[in-house]
Image (tube, rainbow, N blue to C red):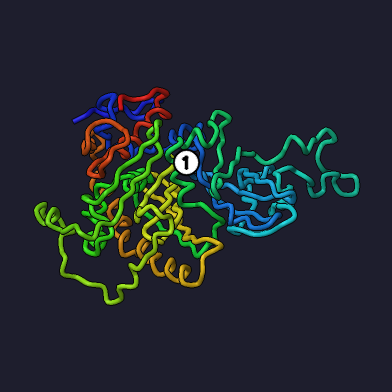
């Protein structure tokens, strides 16, 4: 067992490697607060929303970075802005609706009004009333703008950063991850639907799950039973240099059998089930490369999913040490015909809070959270596929999970671990 000691730089690790992970990282309040400063407000690009969610000039969309409320706007000139969704006066929440259109943003508390660029434009009763009260003569509105973030759009995804040290977005993603995003989001997006899922576990347990290709055809019986994803299919893992961003992909091979799975005595080994409506799995190779499943993550909290023709963006938002909100946005493209829209909507049932595939993911994080209570001195074992965090041409591995912890430790500790 490892003696975990809380300190200013976070919890200590058993070694300089990322193949064992202290359970205290999922339960410690001090660590959680440290993450907000070092990760979410650090030199990272946090996913905020889709460009398509700001369809016109003068529109806004609320989001979050960690627990910090954010509003993203498209100003009258069409430029994007992002700032903390908090009045500069007394800290009231500004935008109360999740999205909308407005010429300016006005606080309901004391009617301070801001432009869509976050500039303070007017203060109610600034000069007082009947020559009494009001703000001091030297009050300068330009010194009380909203707290702005850096904002960037990449292939229809909008990211924000609190830090001036966050690198150019393409450098942050790395060339292979950037190319894989462009592969999926290769034309104007159409939003098909959205929902929010509440997870009773630490946010890092879900991001680990999204990066863990090894569990997918074990935990998710639907995957293997209906031959959507098996670990012996062609595919691999791409991990960027930082470790934080990854892609897992596979191609369907209808000649494979379930023999490998029956030998392992795992749940995903039955081949005697059939769908009442097989059209659920009718798909087209819209990208022309045979890849039928791609799960991509961008550190710290974005998942871009392509499962056959079901495409979705997932936003991971911590709401407490042991609580997370998972936002799902299901998308298609503006040039989709009616048949493709129907196909995407039908296949959207594969993934989501009650998805045929991913329903288990909403439960398994809580299984871990409940099991590790009171055992912060112990750690998990992350050794499948070795001890490094690098791209691999197979998926029986936890290399991208180790990549997450490589990036995480680099930010928290200020040095790159041995990975």
The N terminus appears in which quarter of the rendering?
A: top left
Crowdedness of circle 1 by 10 Å Cα count: few (<14), some, many (20+)?
some
Q: Which residue is mark 1?
A: 178
- Quick check: 189 above or below 124? below
Q: Who is closer to the viewer here, 45 or 135?
A: 45
Residue 292 placed where, x, y %?
35, 56
Residue at position x 81%, y 40% from top? 135
Residue at position x 71%, y 57% from top? 102
* Secondary structure beneath label 1: helix
Specify the farthest residue to the right.
130
The C terminus appears in which quarter of the rendering?
A: top left
Specify the farthest residue to the front.
288
Specify the farthest residue to the bottom.
276
Residue at position x 58%, y 56% from top? 52
Q: Who is closer to the viewer here, 134 or 195?
A: 195
The answer to whether one can see residue 319 in this image is no
Image quadrant assignment for residue 354:
bottom left
Residue 262 placed where, x, y %?
11, 57
Taking the image as shown, residue 13 lies to the left or right of residue 144, namely left
The answer to whether one can see residue 215 in this image is yes
Residue 368 placed where, x, y %?
26, 48
Q: Who is closer to the viewer here, 355 or 331?
A: 331
Residue 384 placed where, x, y %?
21, 39
Q: Who is closer to the viewer here, 255 or 222?
A: 255
């Amino acid at each position: 067992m490892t003696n975990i000691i809380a300190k200013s730089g976070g919890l200590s690790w058993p070694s300089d490697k990322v193949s064992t992970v202290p359970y205290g990282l999922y339960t410690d309040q001090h660590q959680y607060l440290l993450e907000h400063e070092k990760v979410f407000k650090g030199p990272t690009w946090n996913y905020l929303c889709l460009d398509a969610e700001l369809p016109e000039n003068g529109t806004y969309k609320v989001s979050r970075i960690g627990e910090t409320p954010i509003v993203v706007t498209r100003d009258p000139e069409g430029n994007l802005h992002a700032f903390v969704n908090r009045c500069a006066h007394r800290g009231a929440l500004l935008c109360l609706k999740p999205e909308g259109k407005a010429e300016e943003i006005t606080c309901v508390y004391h009617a301070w009004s801001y432009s869509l660029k976050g500039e303070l434009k007017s203060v109610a009763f600034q000069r007082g009333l009947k020559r009494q009260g009001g703000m001091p003569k030297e009050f300068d509105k330009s010194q009380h703008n909203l707290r702005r973030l850096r904002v960037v759009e990449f292939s229809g995804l909008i990211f924000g950063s609190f830090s001036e040290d966050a690198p150019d977005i393409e450098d942050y993603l790395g060339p292979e991850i950037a190319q894989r995003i462009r592969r999926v989001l290769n034309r104007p997006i159409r939003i098909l639907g959205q929902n929010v899922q509440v997870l009773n576990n630490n946010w890092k347990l879900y991001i680990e799950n999204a990066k863990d290709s090894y569990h997918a055809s074990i935990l998710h019986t639907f995957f293997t039973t209906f031959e959507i994803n098996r670990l012996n299919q062609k595919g691999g893992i791409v991990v960027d240099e930082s470790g934080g961003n990854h892609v897992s992909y596979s191609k369907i091979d209808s000649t494979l059998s379930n023999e490998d799975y029956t030998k392992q005595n795992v749940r995903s080994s039955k081949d005697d089930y059939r769908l009442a409506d097989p059209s659920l799995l009718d798909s087209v190779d819209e990208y022309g490369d045979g890849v039928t499943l791609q799960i991509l993550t961008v550190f710290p909290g974005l998942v871009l999913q392509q499962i056959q023709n079901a495409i979705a963006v997932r936003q991971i938002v911590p709401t407490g040490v042991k609580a997370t909100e998972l936002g799902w946005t299901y998308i298609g493209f503006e040039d989709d015909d009616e048949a493709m829209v129907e196909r995407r909507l039908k296949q959207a049932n594969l993934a989501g809070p009650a998805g045929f595939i991913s329903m288990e993911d909403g439960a398994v994080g809580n299984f871990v959270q409940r099991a590790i209570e009171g055992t912060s001195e112990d750690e998990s074992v992350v050794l499948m596929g070795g001890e490094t965090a690098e791209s691999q041409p197979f998926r029986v591995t936890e290399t991208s999970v180790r990549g997450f912890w490589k990036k995480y430790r680099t930010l928290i500790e200020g040095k790159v671990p041995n990975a």
